[in-house]
Image (cartoon, rainbow, N blue to C red):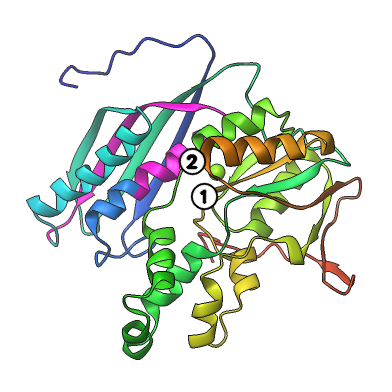
Amino acid sequence: VGDDAALVEPGHGAVLLTTDLLVEGVHFELSMAPRDLGYKALVANISDVAAMAGSPRYALVSTVLSEAVGPPWVIELYGGMLEACKEHACAIVGGDLSRGREVVVSVTITGEVSHRDVVSRTGARPGDRIVVTGWLGGAAGGLALGRAGDDVVRRAAGTDWERELSLALDRPVARVGEGQTLAQCGATAMMDVSDGLALDLTRLCAASSVGARVRLDDVPVHPALRHLAGMLPGHDPLELALSGGEDYELLATIPEDRVTEAMELLNGRYGTRLHGIGEVAATQEVVAVGADGAERPLEPKGWDHFA
Ligand SMILES: [Mg+2]
């Protein structure tokens, strides 16, 4: 930092490039703690590198600031970014700053990956198992809780489940080691779940020209969501797990005979649960199978930036 451009030494494999834009009023509100916002802005990008089985390396950070924020807010924002960078041995090597009516945070990250390990969305084959890391719907639950009335917020305050859902929303985990381990276990396709399982799985299947059968009973619904549903009618845990965004878990397809190995390695190395949720099908349809065996199309609902 300090020269006209960052000068970096390329690694030995391929370079991954990804960028993400967070706009006030669209992706976040200023009521969010700036430290969480900074952390999350980095994690969203690091997660995209993880989804290709890479490791994050350098970050460029550009920010538009409004009159509503002052120096302490900006220091906290960068503090959160540095936290995420430190966790993943990633360095901020440059960026830009300007003034505007709304706050905008733009992060670009480079990552490195070996040609042997890199996993795209296009390699899923009929018969592969569909797996997903961690739990789904937690971030959507945290968002719903944040928008709930004072009464619900007061009753939830201080409970373990409230804390879990808030953490899922504000402090998502980028599954970098998990992505590399899944690649080593023969993952044929992979992506991160940023816009909801139903929508992202539909995208993965389209990229691989395959279909999928998902058993709804096996979808890893975040355990804290049942407490939320008890207080906020209309918030179905399964629905939040299928169509809620921003969980940043990894969705992958792997050969059937490598699934047990992948589950054991993820649990042993990272304490991360890997859940099998269904199979890749030769048809082009993405189908949800209910507990009673009834099948219906899995509607690709999720976070649509232009809805
Ligand atoms: Mg992604």
Q: Is residue 61 left or right of residue 244?
A: left
Q: Residue furthest left?
A: 71
> Disc 2 beta carbon < 8 A from ligand 1?
yes
- In the picture of the structure, the residue carrying the numbered disc 2 is 47
Q: Is residue 301 left or right of residue 71?
A: right
Residue 107 at x, y percent in the picture? 35, 39
- In the picture of the structure, the residue carrying the numbered disc 1 is 248
Q: Identify the secondary structure beneath mark 1.
A: loop
One can see residue 113 in this view: yes
Instruction: Say if the magenta span includes residue 65.
Output: yes
Q: Are marks 1 and 2 in contact (CB under 8 Å)?
A: yes
- From the viewer's side, name the closer residue of 182 and 47: 182
**Quadrant of residue 293 in the image?**
bottom right
The magenta region covers: 40-67
Q: Amino acid at mark 2?
A: Ser
Q: Amino acid at mark 1?
A: Tyr
